[in-house]
Amino acid sequence: MSAETDTSWDEDVRVAVYRAFAEHGRPPTAPELADAAHGSLAVAKQALHRLAERRHLVLDECEHVVLAHPFAAIPLGFSVMGASTLWWGGCAWDAFAIPHLVKAEPEVLVSTRCRGCGEPHALMVNDQAPPKGELVAHFLVPVARMWDDVVHTCGNQRLFCGESCVDGWLAETGQDKGYVMDLATLWRLAAGWYDGRLDHGHTRRDPAAAAAYFERAGLSGPFWR
């Protein structure tokens, strides 16, 4: 069986990608990818492309992993610092999700700036209760279009000082308002969304299951369908 058609190592490669991010804050190296595909980097690269097609991760034009939600290999507005690991958080959603997924780091320091006024903010986020504060999250792109350009989508799920900063930024950039939520709702959204991603056998939610999850988090309406 050729590298182009051998799918038997896809799940091992997926888990290797996620665990490298979780444990080291970075994507796997070429030798680590090859190890996950029984010693063949060619097989691993083909697996990466299939995983990207199935929306398990995002590749750039050089076949490098850019996103493996909730982890990012590029800065998109958030740094997430645990006791022993530093990550780029792909967005507000992902930054809040990391302490829920990485059980060895149940509390992290999420650092960012208000997208509107540039004010710096740092929040302690854990897997037990939402952080306190008046900040809000604004998501620009609705769920149905999030994967049209997922890097753009993630880069526009940001924290703001309040709705006045959201409105000012939208007026300045000429964009339509998306969805605004408080920190408690953001925390509920992030809490269980990525459950199982570090383990073999993980499957993505279908649209009905995703809609039910959003509803439980307190998110409904056309934006979330």
Image (cartoon, rainbow, N blue to C red):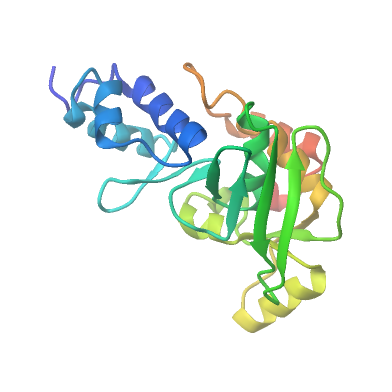
Horizontal side of 220 relative to 134 (left or right) equals left
Which of the 4 image quarters holds residue 9?
Answer: top left
**Residue drawn at the location 24% of the way across and 27% of the way down:** 34
**Residue drawn at the location 68% of the way across and 77% of the way down:** 169
Which of the 4 image quarters holds residue 40?
Answer: top left
Q: Can residue 220 be seen by looking at this rendering?
A: no
Placement of 225 over or under 170, stated as above or below:
above
Placement of 164 over or under 187, stated as above or below:
below
Q: Quadrant of the C terminus?
A: top right
Horizontal side of 182 relative to 208 (left or right) equals right
| Count of numbered circles in the view | 0
The picture places residue 86, in percent across and down from the top left corner, at: 54, 45
Q: Quadrant of the N terminus?
A: top left
Q: Residue furthest bottom?
A: 172
The picture places residue 143, in percent across and down from the top left corner, at: 61, 49
Q: Nearer the viewer, residue 166 or 53?
A: 166
Q: Nearer the viewer, residue 69 or 26?
A: 26
The picture places residue 118, in percent across and down from the top left corner, at: 67, 74
Placement of 213 over or under 202, stated as above or below:
below
Q: Residue furthest left?
A: 2
**Residue drawn at the location 73% of the way across and 79% of the way down:** 168
Q: Can residue 177 be seen by looking at this rendering?
A: yes
**Residue drawn at the location 46% of the way across and 28% of the way down:** 19
The picture places residue 74, in percent across and down from the top left corner, at: 44, 54
